Image: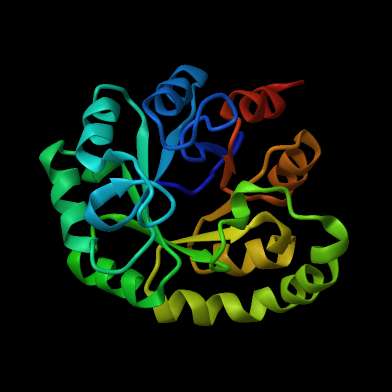
C-alpha cells in the first residue's frame, strides 16, 4: 500500500474509528468512519485479539472488526498494543484477504522487527513516543507539554534515521507535537511517510498538511476531511 503523499491532501485516518462520534473501537465508530469517507480506519489490538486500547478491557474480536471493514473499500490500520500477537494478527488479515490494504503499527521496536521478518510485504509503522498511559485520548495541557515537546521536537530529525533503521519500519507515526518540517524531511529523504497523531483542531491539521505530513490521524475524520477540502 502506497502511503506517500504525492499531491493533494494528506490521508485521513480515523483514530479508533470515528471516536468523536461513537465509543472508540466500537462497531458504531468504525461504521461512522466509513460513512465519513476516511481513507483508513485505525484500531487497537491487545492480547487475545481483543479490539481495545488496554489489556483487560472489553471489546470486539479482531475478526469481527475485519469482517465489518472488509466489505468497504477502506484501509485497515491495526495498532498492536502488546508483544506476542504478531502472527495471529497477520493470520486474521489473511482470512479476509486484507494484507494489501493493511498498515500495522506498534510502539515496541522488537515488535516492529518481528513484523518486518514475518510480513515484509505489509506496511509497518513505528509509533513515537510510546503512549504508556493512553494520553493520546486526551488533550495534553500545553503548559505541561510545551517545553518537553519543544526539546524532543528539536532532537527528532537526528533520531529519526536511527529509529527507522532500528525498527525496520516503512512508516513513521509521530505525535503531532513532535512534527516539524525538519522531521518530516528526515523521514521523506529515506522514502518513509509520516503519520501525525492524534490531531483534531483545524488549525493544527492545516499546519501539519502545510508541512507535508502524509497522513492525519484524527478522532473526527469528517471534520478533518472538511478542513482539508475547504477552499
Q: Residue at x 71, y 27 (%)?
A: 227
Q: Position of residue 183 (x, y in %)?
A: 66, 67
Q: Quadrant of residue 132?
A: bottom right
Q: Residue at x 44, y 47 (%)?
A: 3
Q: Position of residue 8 (x, y in %)?
A: 60, 34
**Is residue 24 left or right of 20 when viewed as pictured?**
left
**Is residue 62 left or right of 34 when viewed as pictured?**
left
Q: Nearer the viewer, residue 68 or 9?
A: 68
Residue 197 seen by the camera: no
Q: Position of residue 49 (x, y in %)?
A: 24, 50
Q: Nearer the viewer, residue 132 or 92?
A: 132
Residue farthest to the top, as pictured? 35
Tell me how the rendering is colored. Answer: rainbow
Report the number of numbered marks: 0
**Is residue 231 left or right of 104 when viewed as pictured?**
right
**Is residue 193 left or right of 176 when viewed as pictured?**
left
Task: Decide: is 229 above or below 116.
Answer: above
Q: Residue at x 72, y 40 (%)?
A: 205
Residue farthest to the right, as pictured? 143
Q: Quadrant of residue 157?
A: bottom right
Q: Position of residue 187 (x, y in %)?
A: 56, 66
Task: Decide: is 56 above or below 224.
Answer: below
Q: Quadrant of residue 167?
A: bottom left
If the image is split into quadrants, where does the C terminus sit? top right
Residue 215 seen by the camera: yes
Q: Residue at x 76, y 68 (%)?
A: 149
Q: Nearer the viewer, residue 221 or 122?
A: 221
Amino acid at each position: 500500500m502506497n502511503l506517500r503523499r504525492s499531491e493533494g491532501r494528506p490521508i485521513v485516518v480515523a483514530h479508533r474509528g470515528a471516536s468523536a462520534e461513537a465509543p472508540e473501537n466500537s462497531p458504531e465508530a468504525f461504521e461512522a468512519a466509513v460513512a465519513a469517507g476516511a481513507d483508513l480506519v485505525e484500531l487497537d489490538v491487545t492480547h487475545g485479539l481483543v479490539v481495545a486500547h488496554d489489556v483487560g478491557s472489553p471489546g470486539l474480536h479482531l475478526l469481527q472488526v475485519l469482517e465489518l471493514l472488509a466489505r468497504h473499500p477502506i484501509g485497515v490500520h491495526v495498532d498492536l498494543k502488546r508483544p506476542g500477537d504478531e502472527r495471529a494478527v497477520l493470520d486474521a488479515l489473511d482470512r479476509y484477504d486484507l494484507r494489501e490494504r493493511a498498515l500495522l503499527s506498534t510502539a515496541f521496536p522488537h515488535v516492529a522487527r518481528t513484523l518486518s521478518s514475518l510480513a515484509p510485504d505489509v506496511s509497518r509503522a513505528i509509533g513515537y513516543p510510546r503512549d504508556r498511559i493512553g494520553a493520546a485520548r486526551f488533550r495534553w495541557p500545553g503548559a505541561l507539554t510545551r517545553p518537553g515537546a519543544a526539546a524532543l521536537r528539536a532532537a527528532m530529525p537526528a533520531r529519526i534515521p536511527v529509529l527507522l533503521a532500528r525498527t525496520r519500519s516503512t512508516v513513521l507515526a509521530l505525535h503531532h507535537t513532535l512534527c516539524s518540517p525538519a522531521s518530516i524531511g528526515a523521514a521523506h529523504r529515506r522514502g518513509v511517510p509520516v503519520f501525525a497523531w492524534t490531531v483534531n483542531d483545524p488549525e493544527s491539521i492545516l499546519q501539519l498538511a502545510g508541512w507535508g505530513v502524509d497522513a492525519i490521524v484524527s478522532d473526527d475524520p469528517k471534520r478533518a476531511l472538511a478542513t482539508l477540502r475547504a477552499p
